[in-house]
Image: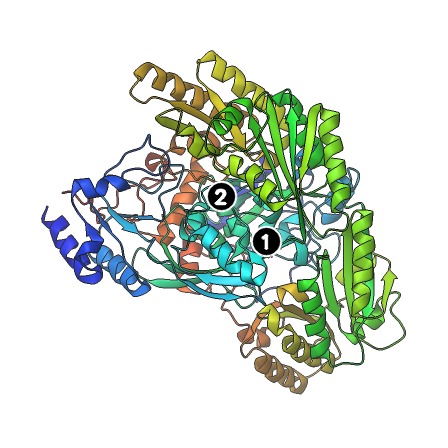
Amino acid sequence: MPLNTDLAARLARIVGEQRVLLRPGELRAYESDGLPGYQLKPSLAVFPGTRDETIAVVRALAEAHAVFVARGAGTGLSGGSLADDVVLLGLHRLKRIISIDGDNARAVVEPGVVNATLTAAASAYGLHYAPDPSSQTVCTIGGNIAENAGGPHCLKYGVTLNHVLALTVLLPSGEVVSLGNAEGEAEGYDLLGAFIGSEGCFGVVLDATVRLERNPQSVRTLLADFSSVDAAAHAVSAIIASGIVAAALEMMDNAAIQVVEASIYAAGYPTDAAAILLIELDGATAGLDDDVARVAAFCADAGARGVRVATDPADRARLWQGRKKAFGAMGRISSHLVVQDAVVPRTKLPAVLAEIHRIGARYRVNVCNVFHAGDGNVHPNIGYDANDADESARVHTAMTEIMQACIDAGGTITGEHGVGLDKLPYMEALFTPTTLGAMCALRDVFDPERRANPGKVVPVHSCREWHAAPSARPIRS
Amino acid sequence: MSADVMTIADRVRSARSRGATLRIVSAGNWLDAGRPCAASERLELAALQGIVSYEPGDLTLTARAATPLAEIERVTAAEGQWLTLDAHGAPSGTIGATVATASAGPLASAFGTPRDHVLGCEFVSGTGDVVRAGGRVVKNVAGFDLVRLVTGAWGTLGALTEITVRLRARPEEDITLAVSVGGISAASAAELAWRWTRESEYRPFAAELVSPSLAQRLTGMSGSPDARLLVRLAGNTSFVRAARSAVAALGDAQPVASSVWGELALAEPAAAIVFRASALPSSIGILCSRATDLAEGFGGYSHATLTRGVVRCVLPAPRDDNAMERLRAGLSQLSTGVTVVGERMPAALWSISSHPGASDALAERVRRAFDPDHIMNPGLLGGA
C-alpha cells in the first residue's frame, strides 16, 4: 500500500494528477487487450505526454524497482500488454510525427502515432507506411514495433522489422540508447532487429525512424470465389509457386464471409462461397494486367467459380473493408473470441485447413478462418461464451489441437500477434530448453531486473538460472 | 541435433574449460576480413555441408552452414528459384559466412541484406549451447529474435551450423543495361541516377554505379572512360520492355550480359583494402564523389548501391608507410559525417571505422551473455 501511494504521488508530480489512474473503476479499461478472455488488473496507470515525462516516469519506476507494462492502443491479440499488480505505462499520448523526409522516404515518429495516421501524413509525399495490421486505424507504431506487426501487404513489402531503420529506446533502467543507424549502415550486433518484436520486455520506444514505401502506380484487387476451401488453398499454392509476388493474398472461409456480410462492413462477398481469395497486385502499370490475367487463370484452374477484378478505388476499399473489419464484425455474434496466429509452410495450407475443419467439427465449435494465405499465416477464430464452462473447455481443447497441428506441419505458433500470455503454453513445444534459455539471456541484457512486462514471451520456469529477480517488486494496492 | 554439431559443441566447451580461444573457419574466404582476430585454435566447420531440406513450393531452403552459395544456386536454379543474396566474393563462399558477416551485394537494393532473408538458424554459442532460433516459415514472431542477433555478429556470439533462408522465384525476364553517365561531375551523375532509381515506377532489382576504372575492367564496357550505371530490370515481358525504354531517359543504355554481376563480385584483387562508406541516400552525390576520388586516387575503384546510400571502395594496399599515412588521412577525412564500415583493412586503418563494432556497453552485455569468456573469434568485431 505505501509503495503504491508513494509511487503514484511521485508519478503525479511528473505527469500531473489527472494522468495517473488508481481507482479500480478507472483501471478497468486497461485490464484487457483485443482478446477479452484475459483480464488482469494493473495497480495504477500512468500516461506521460512527452518524451521527457516518459524518461522521468521510467526512471522513477526503476528507482522504486517497480514492474511495469507498456501499452499503446491496447489492440494486441496475445494478452501482451496487461498484467496483475503492475504499473501500466500508457504511451498513446506520445503521438507526434517528428519529421517526414520525402527524399529519403522515411519518417521519425513517437511511439503513440497511429499506424494509419502516419500513412495519411506520408500520402502528401506519395508515400505510405507499408505494414498494415487490420487494427491500423487505431494501433500505434510503438505497439507495432513491440509485436513486429504484419498485415496483409507484408506479403510483398515485409513486416515491421523490414521497415524500421533506427530507434531511440528507453531501457527499463532509465538509460536511453540508440539502436540501428538512420544515416548509413549499422555495424555491430543487430540490436535493432533483436528489439523489434520483443513485446515490451526490452524497453520502451521513445522515437522510431521508419522507412516509407512509394505508392504504387497502379493497383488491382481480385475477388476470387471458390466452392471449396481446398480449391482456394490450391490456388494460393499455384500463385506463390509462379513467382508473381502479390501485394496481398488473403483468404476468408464461408463462416467469415457470413459474419462480415451480416455486419455493417458488408463488402459484397458471395455468401454461398466456401471460400474467397482477396488478391492484390500492384506496381508499374506496364505488365500488371499480364500478372492479373495469370493469377485469374490460376484461380480458374484451381476451380474458382468466378474472379472479379476491381480497379476503382472505392470498389477496392469496400472489398478491403470487409477483410480488415472481419474481426470487429465477429463481436456481433459472440461475447468472447479466441484468435490464433500460426504460420505453416505454404505447401501445407490445404492439409492444415482440412485438419482445422476436422478439429472444429470434433469439438462442435465454430471455427472461422480469415487470414494471410500468401504467407501461410492462418488466423482460426472461434467465437464463444466464456460463461458457458462446457463450451469454453471445448474451445480451449480445439485451439490446443489446432496449434499442435500447425507445429506438426513444420509451422510456428505466431506470425504477427506475438506470444504474450496467450501463446506462452506452446513455446516449449516449439523451442528447446536451451533456446528458451538463450532468449532469457537476451532479455536479461536489456532488462536485468526483469521488470518490463514480466512473465511474457518465455515461460518463467523454462529459463535457466531463473530466480524471480529479488529486487523487482509487484505493486499491490 | 546431428553428431557433428554435438562435436562442435564439445570442442567449444573444451576450449572454454582450457582457456583456449577459437577462430571459426569454413571456406576460409573471410580470414583476412574484419578487425584483427587473435585466437589460439581453429574451429573447423567445413564439414557442415549440404542442403537439409528444400521444398520449392514453400520458397524456403535449409542448408548446413558451410554449404557453398554455388550449391544453393545450383539446386534452386533447377526449380526456377534463387537466393537473392549476391555477396561479393567467390561462389565457393558459404551461406554461413554470408550470414555471419551480413554480406550483401547489388541485389540488396531491391531485396535487402541477410537479415531480410534468414528465417531460422542453429548455432553453437560461446558456452557450447546448441540454440535453434526462428523456424522454417516466412513469418515468425515466436520468442525473442535470436536470428537477427547472430546475423552479422561475425561468429562472436556463436558458430552458425545451419541456416534457413527465404527464396524467390526467378523472374520471367532479367536484363542488365549499362548506362553511360559521362559529361557531368561524378556527384551529379550519382545524384541523377539515384533520383531516377527512387522515382521510377520501374523499380530495378539492382542499380549500381560503377566508377570509371571499374567500368573499364568489365566486359562490354570499353569505349568512353565514363562511370556506368548498371541497371538490372526484371519481371514479365511487358514490364521489362517498358522499363527498358524508361532507362533510356538517363543516357545511352546498352544491354550487357548478366554475367557482369559475377564479374563485379569477383573484381577485387587479393589483399585489397575494402571499406564501405554510407550516409543518407539523398547525399549519395557528394558521398559517391568523395569516396570514388579517394579510391581511384589510390589506384582502386568504387561502386555504389544508390538506393541504400552505400559506396563500396576497393583499393590496393599502399606500398609504403607514406602512402598508408596518406590513405589514413584520406579515410579519416571521408569519415566525417559518414559511416565507414571496414571489410578488409590493415590494422592501422581500423580506428577510423565509424562504429566501434561490438564494444558499446549494451553490445558488450550481449557478448557476455552468449560468449562470457570471449572465446569465439576474439577481436573480430572490436572489443576483446
Residue sitting nearer the eye, A239 or B35: A239
**Pick the front one: B43 or A205:** A205
- In percent of width and height, residue B328 lies at 60, 81
Dot 1 alpha-carbon crowd within 10 angstroms: few under 14, some 14 to 19, many 20 or more: many
**Closest to the observer: B212 or A331?**
A331
The image quadrant that residue B282 belongs to is: bottom right
**In the image, residue B162 lies at what x, y percent?**
60, 42
Q: Residue at x 67, y 55 (%)?
A: B110
Residue B58 position within the rendered picture, expressed as x and y whole percent measured from the top left: 66, 35
Which quadrant of the view contains residue B2?
A: top right
Residue B104, x across and y down, in percent: 66, 58
Quadrant of the image for the N terminus of chain B? top right
Amino acid type at circle 1 is Ala
Query: Residue A133: which numbered mark, if any?
Result: 2
| Left or right: residue A337 compared with residue A165 | left
Q: Residue furthest bottom?
A: B322
Is any part of residue A226 visible from this angle?
yes
Nearest the eye: A409 or B250: B250
Q: Is residue B298 above or below residue B275?
A: below
Q: Label 1 belongs to which residue?
A: B100
Residue B39 visible (yes or no)? no
